[in-house]
Image (cartoon, helix red, strand yellow):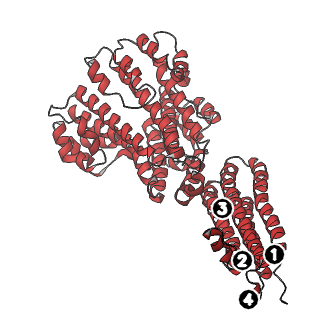
Amino acid sequence: MYGFEALTFNIHGGYLEAIVRGHRSGLLTAADYNNLCQCETLDDIKMHLSATEYGPYLQNEPSPLHTTTIVEKCTLKLVDEYKHMLCQATEPLSTFLEYITYGHMIDNVVLIVTGTLHERDVQELLEKCHPLGMFDSIATLAVAQNMHELYRLVLVDTPLAPYFSECITSEDLDDMNIEIMRNTLYKAYLEDFYKFCQKPGGATAEIMSDLLAFEADRRAVNITINSIGTELTRDDRRKLYSNFGLLYPYGHEELAACEDIDQVRAVMEKYPPYQSIFAKLSYGESQMLDKAFYEEDVKRLCLAFEQQFHYGVFFAYMRLREQEIRNLMWISECVAQNQKSRVHDSVVFIF
Amino acid sequence: MSGSSSWSRALVLISPYTFSAVGIAISIGVSVLGAAWGIHITGSSLIGAAIKAPRITSKNLISVIFCEAVAIYGVIVAIILQTKLESVPESKKYAPESLRAGFAIFASGIIVGFANLVCGLCVGIIGSSCALSDAQNSSLFVKILVIEIFGSALGLFGVIVGIIMSSQATWPAKTA
């Protein structure tokens, strides 16, 4: 019942909620980002980060640093925290935590399949996979020739198996099919996650519905913009949109018919929450759209912490950390390539 | 005990000793339930938050003490109530005075028990939020403590009314 979670939540989730809130206090603040943006070299970045919670992870790295090393070690910190929480969790929190990583699993699967298509080495691809999305038989993905084999050999044993029912075809895998597969899988995953969050009910259902609906809408807009000018038909595009969210179903109808960015903007401005996002962009400009969406996302994720006794804080924390790692990657790349003027283009401050 | 409905006959035929005993049991049992519930809500958050911010542990034990106070109220009232429980001669067992005394002790037990139950819950939930907020920003502790003090006053109200209620539990005198 909504409002009475406080009575029983702490039995199973109290300790972990307190831990995740402790982790949240370790997220980098605007002051940290300002310091990092003023760094001249990657070693400066390492020095600044050693004063934050990333210190123990970066201190043993030898110079010269690479940007990929920084990102890898920061991701390692996130993975350690996640694993610590996962091994302490009981049902249904443990399933909830696992759901958070299925998106990374999908990304890893697509990465390996694409890489194999372009004849890269499997080991090299495995190193690029996101550690949160690893599963046991992931290396066997390189062997599959079409989706049927992909499913039968590898994916039927993973948690992603139920998401494949909509996209098993016997066609061979090529770039277009793989993108469609990725989006179909992600659509099925979001819908499954949404349904899963309705079961605990109460605050978890309400907060997660809002966060997942924003995610679904954002993906719909990105799919639309990315498929303008490709050979993806309207019906195919429509099939990739999720069955929930603010834009469902009328917004999706209109988005499926869009042929350029201004039409997308016209559709989105009918929805007040997205109107404020699109109002920040001038006409014809789409590069800043990603950043505008990230800012709105971060705002909503931070709001999830305002309420106690629900699972949304775990999801919000993982997403905020990933945003922080994206920020660090951007800053490191700008510093490494000496383009410090562009640093503020893509850094989203969390606090 | 005239021929009214059968339920009213059933109620007045229950022995006043039963009512008194149940009242005493509720006063201590339900109070301790409230205290335990509150302490576990506060305790789990406190332990988790103290990992990142060890400084909060000593101050936030106050929340646990407030919850514990609720159980102590229950014990005190139970002891007071059991001293009020006297034997009356068989002939006077269903006299109106006896029934009144039995009901008074029963009501006192319910008042104290349930007031302490919700007080313990209230203080426990606030204590949990207090620990989490204190871990992030230590200036919040005293302000949230004020809310907890108001919450723990609820248990006190219950104790006061319960003791007033039980003071009128006078059993009929032993002489016929």
**Residue at the disc numbered 1:** B169
Which quadrant of the figure has residue A155? top left
Question: In the depicted view, which residue is nearer to us: A274 or A284?
Answer: A274
> Which one is in front, A58 or A65?
A58
Residue A56, position as x, y percentages in the image: 54, 50
Amino acid type at circle 2 is Ser
Specify whether residue B147 is in view: yes
Disc 4 secondary structure class: helix
> Residue tagged by mark 2?
B20
Looking at the picture, how far across and down is residue B145, in whole percent? 77, 53
Q: Which residue is mark 3?
A: B38
Dot 4 corresponds to which residue?
A: B90
Going 52% across and 31% down the picture, which residue do you hit?
A297
Which comes before the other along the chain, label 4 or label 1?
Answer: 4
Residue drawn 67% across the image and 70% down it: B32
Q: Is A329 drawn above or below residue A74 in the view shown?
A: above
Q: Are marks 4 and 1 on the same chain?
A: yes
Label 3 with label 4: CB-CB less than 8 Å: no
